[in-house]
Image (spheres, rainbow, N blue to C red):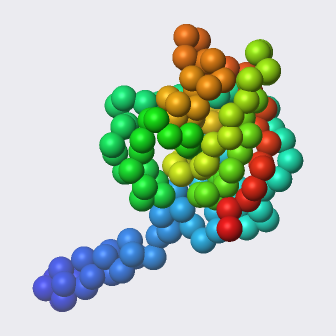
Amino acid sequence: MAKTALIFFPAVLFLMTQCVPSPLYHGNTVRTKKSSLQDRSTGVSGSVSGVASYYADKFHGRKTASGEIFDQNKFTAAHRTYPFGTIVLVANNENGKSVRVRINDRGPFIDGRIIDLSLAAAKEIDMLRSGTANVTLTVVRPEK
């Protein structure tokens, strides 16, 4: 009996772990650090305001969540839920400058921030010195 249990228990445990969904992605949803499941299948539209940050040197040349290699000199960004390929207009609410970026990564994963911009995009809206800026995001073109 003990020998059968030693064989049976690990097999059951293995099968149970294979049925657990990924903590980040499950079907048409993305699980963010603090929020509940958010539905991406409804598409994106409208505007949202919040804090933007940027990322550069440390991630330059690394693979993004979309599989693309991050280039800090391109106009790209990370967003928690917008589909990859979505074009977003990011307007700096403090100086009126704006830039169009393409979503190609996931993030930011810091509470209170809504988008991580590439270095080139951050330069364009003049937020390098402060590191963050109050922005408004407007979807220009959803992903195809």
Residue at the spot 50% in from the left edge and 29% down from the top edge: 119
Residue at the spot 61% in from the left edge and 48% down from the top edge: 102
Which residue reaches farthest right?
Answer: 46
Residue at the spot 73% in from the left edge and 67% down from the top edge: 41
| Residue 3 located left or right of residue 132 | left
Which residue reaches farthest left?
Answer: 3
Q: How many marks?
A: 0
Residue 36 appears in the rendering: no
- Compare residues 103 and 9 and report the one nearer the observer: 103
Residue 88 appears in the rendering: yes
Quarter holding residue 115: top right
Which quarter of the figure is the N terminus placed in? bottom left
- Compare residues 8 and 80 and report the one nearer the observer: 80
Residue 104, compared with residue 52, is above or below; it is: below
Q: Measured from the top left, where is residue 130 in percent x and y?
A: 58, 12
- Compare residues 60 and 123 and report the one nearer the observer: 123
